[in-house]
Image (tube, rainbow, N blue to C red):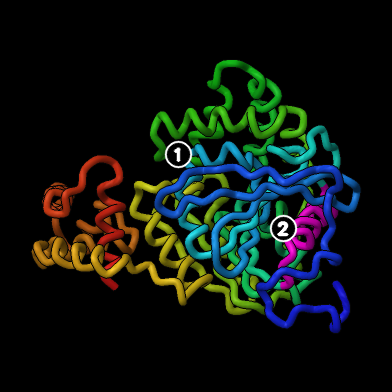
Amino acid sequence: MEGAADRNPIGDRPLRTRHRRRLRRRRPIIVGVGTHGGDAAQDIRFARSADGVGIAYAVHGSGAPLLIDACWLSHLQFDWQSPVWRHYLVELGRIATVIRYDERGHGLSDRGMTDHSLAARVADLEAVADDAGFERFALMAMAQGGPVALEYAARHPERLTRMVFYGSYPGAHAGVSAEELELYAAFEALIKVGWARPTSEFRRVFSSMMIPGGTEEQMRWLDDLQRMAVDAETAVLSRRQRQTIDSSPRMAELDLPTLVISSRGDQMNDFQHARDLAAGIRGARLVALESSNHIVLADEPAWPVFLRELTSFLAPDRSLMPPPAAADAHAEALAALSPRELDILGLAAQGLDNDAIAAKLVLSVRTVERHLQNVYAKLGLQGRTARAAAVGKLLSRG
């Protein structure tokens, strides 16, 4: 960190250019991702890590800075086309200036790396944070990013405003069951055998565990992402080295606002890991999503719950309320719903599925389904996204 005299007193303003580390002879790439509804061009840049590895990162959106620690499977350009990730990118860009990066050996970052240790991955995060030029920012750890984020936070508490853990864990040896260890070994064997195959039957195992509630289109996209994001050798090496990392002792050192979000039925990272994070970090708040998907999809009830919680935590000043004309239209449409329909929609907004709603209201599941169909008809909604859209209209009412 620079001396106090050099620091910018405003936390989310860029640092002076002379304090930023750049990967020379690489020019930023501007990637257009659309012109409607929250879409904006992203600026792809490259930072140089401590060992010289080039780390690709992208910046889009507006608001206070949010740096997202690298996920195992990502591709900065390909993700914008994704029916699995696009809704995250669009909505997060509405509430924050989003900085995200491809892990070393993955996506647009330098390929063929053999060092995927905690030290190397923390150095990558440090390089991106410094190069992006924000003195203070929120840090979001997704999936296997938890140990890296914990280590970074312990080393650089002065850089962080708050933290979010989503579907993550504190360390590979923190409460990992024998069953999970067997699963790790099975995954490694599947990667070696099937990663490079032109057909996707082996890669589909990963996809079906990440998004068991996904459509065939979403599954196919994840199948393709696996080969596009990383080669088989790097996938095995990076997973193997991650399994030796445990940053759980760092949890006790954190003292900043922290939100932990996870799906109850997550098949990639057990929900118990989220409980461990929330219990181990002082003052952390745990939000359980009623979903079996590791990556919550846009058309399930858990998505508006996730978005509401994240927005209120990261950007409470950025309301989810629609423009006045749209708000009036929403209010008029909701006024047509019966009290029972509003009750059911309200429970859906809390993330309850039809079985849970039926049990809570002492109704049959068929009756709940019938009421929801009436809600969709009155609101002019149809298809797989009808439930999420209806919940969104209710939440936007305030």
Q: Main secondary structure of the magenta part?
A: helix
Q: Under tag 1, what secondary structure? A: loop
Q: Is residue 302 left or right of residue 326?
A: right
User: Residue 159, position in %: x, y?
Assistant: 74, 72
User: Residue 118, position in %: x, y?
Assistant: 81, 53
Res 282 seen here: yes
- Magenta-highlighted residues: 117-135
Residue found at x 43% / y 58% = 289
The residue under label 2 is: 147
Residue found at x 85% / y 37% = 114
Confirm whether the magenta stretch covers residue 129.
Answer: yes
Q: Dot 1 surroundings within 10 Å: few (below 14), some, or many (20 or more)?
A: some
**Dot 2 amino acid type:** Pro
Quadrant location, the N terminus: bottom right
In the image shown, does 210 or 19 lie closer to the viewer?
A: 19
Residue found at x 68% / y 72% = 13
Above or below, 331 against 87 in this view is below
The residue under label 1 is: 83
Res 243 seen here: no
Q: Under tag 2, what secondary structure? A: helix
Choose mark 2 or mark 1, whichever is in front. 1
User: Is disc 2 in contact with disc 1, using a CB cutoff of under 8 Å?
Assistant: no
Distance from disc 2 to disc 1, alpha carbons, whole Å, reads 28 Å
